[in-house]
Image (cartoon, grey):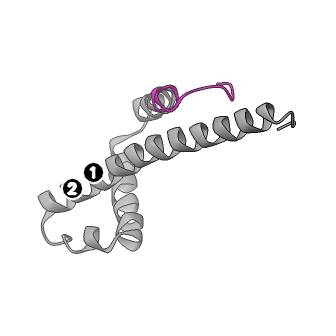
């Protein structure tokens, strides 16, 4: 990866890393990871903990929360990149180094 990539490329690369990691992960480790990660999510997002007695809703809430993070990351990264590009263009227009 280089520093010149877009959010979609970043997600694609992260997916490839995750698929490599899961390929060699024993089932017991996957179960432990899911339990630990849901615990972390519940500390960060109380709505996750509200569903601890309903495994289906807990799974939906945890999955949608992690997916929301990915989408928010893409949106935030794109916005930040546009802001940086705009600042650099303004600086260049006024003959300043960025």
Rendered image: mark on residue 59: 2
> Magenta includes 31?
no
Tell me where residue 24 appears, x and y as whole percent: 44, 32
For residue 40, which quarter of the picture?
bottom left
Side of 53 where 48 appears, left or right: right
Residue at 38 percent of width and 64 percent of height: 41
**36 shown above or below 78:** below
Q: Residues within 10 Å of mark 1 (few under 14, many from 20)?
A: some
Q: Which type of secondary structure does the marked residue at label 2 adopt?
A: helix
First to last magenta residue range: 1-12
Tell me where residue 71 appears, x and y as whole percent: 38, 44
> Magenta includes 2?
yes
Q: Real-space Cα distance between discs 1 and 2?
A: 6 Å
Total labels: the figure holds 2
Q: Quadrant of the N terminus?
A: top right
**69 shown above or below 48:** above
Side of 2 where 80 appears, left or right: left
Residue at 28 percent of width and 57 percent of height: 62
For residue 84, which quarter of the picture?
top right
Rendered image: mark on residue 26: none
Tell me where residue 9 appears, x and y as whole percent: 50, 25
Check whether the beta carbons of the residues at disc 1 and disc 2 lie within 8 A of each other: yes
Tell me where residue 64 appears, x and y as whole percent: 26, 51
90 or 81, which is in the foreground? 90
Residue found farthest to the front = 94
Q: Quadrant of the C terminus?
A: top right
Q: Which type of secondary structure does the marked residue at label 1 adopt?
A: helix
**91 shown above or below 68:** above
Rendered image: mark on residue 63: 1
Q: Residues within 10 Å of mark 2 (few under 14, many from 20)?
A: some
Residue at 44 percent of width and 31 percent of height: 15
29 or 80, which is in the foreground? 80
């Amino acid at each position: 990866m280089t520093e010149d990539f877009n959010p979609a490329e970043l997600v694609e690369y992260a997916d490839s890393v995750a698929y490599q990691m899961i390929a060699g992960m024993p089932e017991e480790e996957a179960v432990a990871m899911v339990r630990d990660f849901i615990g972390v999510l519940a500390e960060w997002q109380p709505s996750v903990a509200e569903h601890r007695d309903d495994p289906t809703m807990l799974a939906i809430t945890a999955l949608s929360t992690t997916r929301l993070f990915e989408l928010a990351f893409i949106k935030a990264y794109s916005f930040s990149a546009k802001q940086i590009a705009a600042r650099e263009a303004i600086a260049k227009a006024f003959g300043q180094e960025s």
